[in-house]
Image: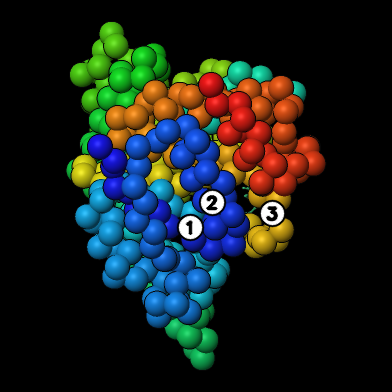
Amino acid sequence: MLKNITVIPGDGIGPEVTEAVLEVLSAAGAELEYDFQAAGVGAIATHGSPLPQETSDSIERNRVALKGPLATPSGSGFRSVNVEIRKRFDLFANVRPARTILPGGRYEDIDLVLIRENTEGLYVGVEHFIGMDRDPRAAAESVMITTRYGCERIVRFAFDYAVAHGRGKLTLAHKANILKYTQGLFLEVGQRMAADYDGRVAFEDGIIDATAMFLVLDPYRYDVLVMENMFGDILSDLMAGLVGGLGFAPAGNIGESHAVFEAVHGSAPDIAGQGVANPTGLLLSACMLLDHVGQAEVASRVRGALTAVIRDGVARTRDMGGRDGTAAFTQAVKGALA
Ligand code: NAI
């Protein structure tokens, strides 16, 4: 039976990479039915809102979505639609695997997973300006919110992920030495919960700045990492850099009942419309989606074809040092499907 999913092509390169991904999924025999919906800057013109009600209703109904990048103008009054979707569907866990596909990079055989808390911390959006003298923006405050409930569910998710995926170690990265309350609570929850997984998953904690350094110097010392929202946002891009850049990084935003899969990269306005975007990030995200909906065998075929094409240099996009456009790359992946 076909599984209905919401598909949001999004802004910038979103429509190009989405088209490429759906072509590969169809050639691989994915049993999916697509409910196309608009969101992002493009949806303001067509629907009068960056997150139209129909789009929200579609995700609510289908419970699973594949989402292209959505542009968020920096520093404007327009709140990130990505953040809004995560909040609305309580997608508390952001799962970001970083795995080497393109050989010859800084490191070979990287295989890391970062699990980022997705709903709390500084990204809750509780911020305001404070006026002084005649300057209405003399100071600004952002509130970092951390709850025991939020810490427990993300750390539990990370331990369970490690167990389910046969991974032996979980590193909780934090800044409890300075942020003694918010990050202290996160660390305390991790240390307590580690006892429940004793003998199954080894637990360690590390200060976030040192963790960033060690990820660059010796990434093999890590396996699964868990951290709060903003730290995870930053370090997951660092980890994408270890495997060749943003074009290779997939992500799943997982909640109790809903899940939205997306590439880590943004709308890449600098290359939008040129037919040169690398669809790998979204394609790997679609593979995570397939795993999630019980079509792991299709996911594994797609990953196999994608890996073979990139590894053997059958086709490579510009960001991989190749010359192929999105269409030629997509054809090569389709051709490599076993
Ligand atoms: P970006 O990820 O769009 O681009 C950074 C650099 O990476 C650019 O040089 C771009 O050409 C390149 N790049 C990104 N994806 C690529 C791909 N698939 N193939 C080849 N090259 C690729 O980040 P930037 O420029 O900071 O953000 C642009 C917009 O995207 C902003 O409005 C931002 O808010 C939004 N954004 C949306 C995200 C989402 O929807 N999940 C995530 C990150 C940013």
Camera-nearest label, 1 or 2: 2
Task: For the residues labelled 1 and 2, say whether their Cβ atoms are less than 8 Å apart.
Answer: yes
- Which element type, helix, strand or loop, lies under badge 2? helix
Instruction: Give the CA separation, mark 1 to mark 2.
Output: 8 Å
Res. 216 image quadrant: top right
Residue at image point 67% right, 28% down: 310
Pick the front one: 125 or 10: 10
Amino acid bearing label 2: Glu
Kindly identify the residue that appears in the image at 47 percent across and 38 percent down. 25
Q: Residue at x 54, y 70 (%)?
A: 73
The residue drawn where x is 67% and y is 46% is 326
- Residue 235: where, in percent of width, then height? 53, 40
- Give amino acid for label 1: Pro
Q: Which mark is residue 9?
A: 1
As measured in the structure, the alpha-carbon distance from the residue carrying label 2 to the one carrying label 3 is: 11 Å
The amino acid sitting under disc 3 is Gly
**Quarter in which the N terminus is drawn:** top left
Q: Is residue 35 above or below residue 20?
A: below
Q: Which mark is residue 275?
A: 3
| Horizontal and vertical percent position of residue 331 | 64, 38
The outermost residue toward the bottom is 134
236 displayed left or right of 323: left
Q: Which residue is mark 2?
A: 19
Q: Residues within 10 Å of mark 1 (few under 14, many from 20)?
A: many
Q: Judge left or right: residue 80 versus residue 281.
A: left
**Looking at the picture, how far across and down is residue 117, in whole percent?**
35, 43
Mark 2 or mark 3: whose residue is earlier in sequence: 2
Label 1 vs 2, first from the N-terminus: 1
